[in-house]
Image (cartoon, grey):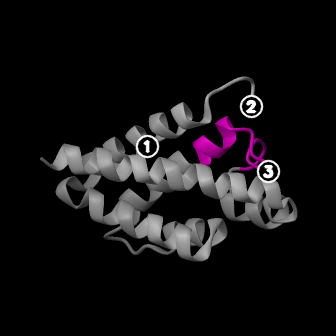
Amino acid sequence: MNGKNLDQLCAQFGWKIADSVHRAIGRNAENHITKSLGVLQEDGVYAFFLYQESRGSREKEWAEKIKNCAKELLKEANITGFQNSNDPLQAVREHLANDLDQLLLAKRLLEQALIYARYHAKALKE
């Protein structure tokens, strides 16, 4: 991790997610971030990335922003498989799924970043 504060990293990416999604869709940003967080919490990291990939044309822009920020966060945190892969689904399938500690850390980091993003989006809405 190179001495980085993981909570600070989550806060930075939480802001980045909220700002980019808010710029893309405005007032609905909080709702879409909350849906993504729910998928992550209920179904895990792979389902979270699959959910972003599966969004239709109306939702594609914000989903792409969330997915890209999530990939950057995991890469920055040196999570297994994300340094060398542009495909997060492949990174989870081929690398992260084999390392339970890294998988749980990735889920926790994404959860924290999305929680911060939700609060940022709420503040941006007001």
| Residue 89 appears in the picture as rendered | yes
Residue at 65%, 45% (x, y): give it: 74
Q: Is residue 35 magenta?
A: no
Residue at 24%, 56% (x, y): give it: 25
What is the three-letter code of the residue carrying label 1? Gly
Q: Earlier in the sequence, mark 1 or mark 3?
A: 1
Label 1 to label 3: alpha-carbon separation: 21 Å
The label on residue 81 is 3
Q: Between residues 13 and 63, which one lies in front from this camera angle?
A: 13
Q: Nearer the viewer, mark 2 or mark 3?
A: 2
**What is the secondary structure assignment of the residue under circle 1?**
helix
Residue at 40%, 65% (x, y): give it: 60
| Residue 61 appears in the picture as rendered | no
Residue 83 as seen in the image, left or right of residue 72? right
Label 2 to label 3: alpha-carbon separation: 14 Å
Which residue does the numbered mark 1 point to in the structure image?
14
User: How many discs appear?
Assistant: 3
What is the three-letter code of the residue carrying label 2? Met
Which residue does the numbered mark 2 point to in the structure image?
1
What span is in magenta?
71-85
Placement of the N terminus among the 4 image quadrants: top right
What is the three-letter code of the residue carrying label 3? Gly
